[in-house]
Image (cartoon, coloured by chain):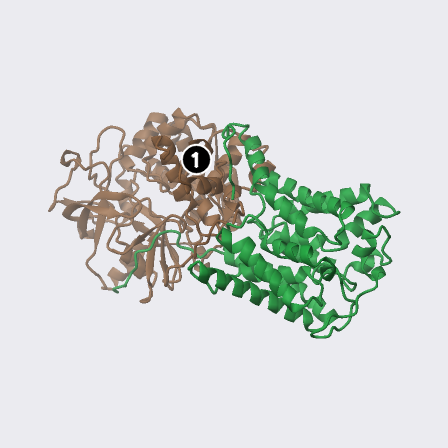
Chain colours: A green, B brown
Amino acid sequence: MKLALSDGRAPFYKKEQTVATMMDDTIFCLLALLILPVVFYGVRPLITVLVSCMSCFLAMVAFRLIHRRNISLSERSLLVTGLTIAMLLPADIPYWMAALAGAFAMFAAKEPFGSTGRNPFNPAAAGIAFLTVLWPEEVSRFPAVGPLPLWERGAEAASSQTPALSLLQGLKPILEPAEMLWGNYAGPLGGTAALVIAGCCLFLCFRRTARWEITAGFLLSSALIGAFWPRFLGSAASSAAYELLSGSLLFGAVFMATDPVTSPKMPVARFVYGMLGGALLLCMRHVGQYQEPLCFAILLSNGAAPLLDRLALRIRTRGGIFRGKAFHAE
Amino acid sequence: MLRGLHGFHGLHSPYALSRGIRLEKHRSRSLKKGIRDIEAEKQKENAKGKKKPEFLLIPLYGAEESSARLIHPGDRVEKYQVLTAPGAGAPEVCSPMAGIVEDIRPLQVPLEGSVLCARLRVSGEKQDGDSPQNGKKKSRGKKKETSLDRADILRMAEKAGIRDEFDGTPLPLLAERFRSSGVKVLVGCGLDDDPYGDSSGAVLRECAREAAEGLRLFALACGAQRSMLAATSFYTWRRVVASEKETPVVSMGGRTPARGVLAGKLRRSVGKAGFVGIQACVALYRAAREGIPQTETVVTVSGDGVWKPGNLRVPVGTPIEVLLNRCGVLPDTKLVYIGPAIAGEAVTDLTLPVTQRTRCITALKQQPINKTYACIGCGRCARVCMRGILPWLVHDVINRDTVDPLMLWNVERCTSCHSCSAACPAGIDLAAEVARAAAIRRSGDFE
């Protein structure tokens, strides 16, 4: 039998895990996280997600047209960015704000550096930071749980129903930590359903899409600081539990800090990076005026990631290889 | 975790557990059926009168100079006749079958480069006049096994032309290398760390006893104090443990590169490990026991391009197409490659021969395409590397305008196992970059 054979080069197998499948894992988890908000608030969260993803896509297309680069329609990372931005915003955020955050993320934090794999800062965190600086009240005004109107903002939740706000005011939240597990209280769209986030965390770590060292470091340092320096009069354990469950800390620890592009590559450095992120977040919660300064904590620790990598490398090679030369991991 | 390693303490080091990568297996169930002997099948067919003309391309290693060849075109050779005289220390090549030498010319053999091959038209069971079993009786100068010493074993391996199936090294050379580097533990390597290959496992399952005996002889030859057998799958491990009670057997559970991972574990617990292929062990045992040279090899033919995958025992020099046809190659096969999926070599000329180094032939209906992305810094490459290289750092440094050689850390230790390339989700050929970095570091050209 005469066969028409091609002359290929190794490797001759289909990879199980590629960058695309890692993105798919994350997108799958973010979509799973969207189910409960849709049950609580109606279809509005879906539209917000759609708007932020579309704006990310359009910003990417516009940037690449301006700079005459190839446009790839199979780019999944912008979906991750769009979904993450929507998850960190209130469910009734005006659509234009979500669109603006998405556009800023792509235009200022991702595309100028050369797209996926080369951005030094988490684009979603940059987009949210942009909104938080410009419109702090709008970003931290969370609606009460219930169906939302499609266009106007919903009724604001009572401050007693917003644990992050109570903590900022130095009060113990009325909700018990056990009542906060399913996310049926006022808070950022995707940051409240702690159990779903924990499930996503297990899935992502099991698939090795996210690194457990970062999440562990993040949660450990947050819990420790929360336990030793409570923001209200209460036991250490309850303070730590409220700090972990309120705001979007869990979401940040699982979905944003673990972004492989912006986090260190050495395992030890990853753990320290996570600890640094958690410590920065808790310090900002103590000192700052913002209800949820997660995006700033993520951006600052992103900035420290190359430095941590360099330190870890220096320890691993026992100071052997760097001799004071500048090291650019990104 | 290593199964069945009693007496090898300290193998459960947590440091070693995270190294290596698991590749998804594509092994067909029919590979478990046992090794098909092509010659026996042919003899049955010949008895039915379906005889076809056939030829072998026997690689004549070490006979590039005409003075080292004992045959010339037109000569008639008998089964097990010595074809080369390459000089002291190098193994002789024996003819797997009787026939007439038609031609001697160099061929581009996959994985081995240019090799001088003799084209042998197979003919005449009648001159030979006997079955392989009778041929075995005509053994050359065999001693009783128990009284063999090191020199005897090496001479026997040389006479029998035995080569390690993993890298084609002649067995006497391998023994010398192990002896001089102080190998403490000798591993009979039945490891198939490939998604498709199963030939070593099949040999280990069927000939565990012979393999253990051959391994014992080889350990004697290279001065290793301990020996053990290594299998990939739990299935093989169970079969081997049931039939071989004296030699310890480990199961590596399908990690790639299995040899590297096991070597690391053994180095930390017992001492330096040396690896010898299981087919070479079996061949050494048969050479000692029956005096027959290594003229056969077991090859896995697998992939979605054949409808009857299997492990085939064939004479060395059989053309690849014979094996593919035996396994029912499908007409829409687009790619045939030899060797592991990670670093194999594609073949377009199917008349090329199978050598002792050929362990797996894979036929695929289409070449898998892996898209390439920018490095996302997931760190998997560093995690799977058993030599402590940081391929992501090499990738980062080597793609700059000026390369800082001090940052190409450990690159000279690379064993080209390609597990970093296999693990990289971005599809970057990291093994090639590490090799380039090692070359740069050696050359001293850092611009």
Residue B367 vertical placement versus B179 (above, below): below
Judged left or right of residue A85, residue B314 is: left
Q: Amino acid at mark 1?
A: Val
Residue B367: name its quadrant.
bottom left
Q: In the rendered view, would you say B176 is above or below A217?
A: above
Instruction: Judge by depth and name the residue closer to the eye, A232 or A138.
Output: A138
Instruction: Report the chain holding disc 1.
Output: B
Q: Position of residue B250 (x, y in %)?
A: 52, 41
Q: Residue furthest bottom?
A: A150
Q: How many marks?
A: 1
**Residue situated in front as seen by the camera: A327 or B427:** A327
Q: Nearer the viewer, residue B411 or B249?
A: B411
Residue B375: image location, x then y, percent: 48, 49
Examine the rendering and report whether any part of residue B279 can be seen. yes
Please tell me how crowded label 1 is: few (under 14), some (14-19), or many (20+) other residues with Cα within 10 Å: many
The residue at 86%/53% (across/down) is: A172
Residue A246, given in percent of the width and then of the height, sits at: 77, 55
- Residue farthest toward the front in the current orientation of the protein: A134
For image coordinates 85% across by 59% down, the residue present is: A175
A39 over B13 or under it: above or below: below
Q: Nearer the viewer, residue A288 or B97?
A: A288
Which quadrant of the figure contains the C terminus of chain B?
A: top left
Q: Position of residue A127 (x, y in %)?
A: 62, 57
Name the image quarter holding residue B65: top left
- Give the SS element for disc 1: helix
Asked if residue B186 can be seen in this view, the reply is: no
Residue of label 1: B411
**Furthest residue toward left:** B74
Q: Is residue B343 left or right of residue A83?
A: left
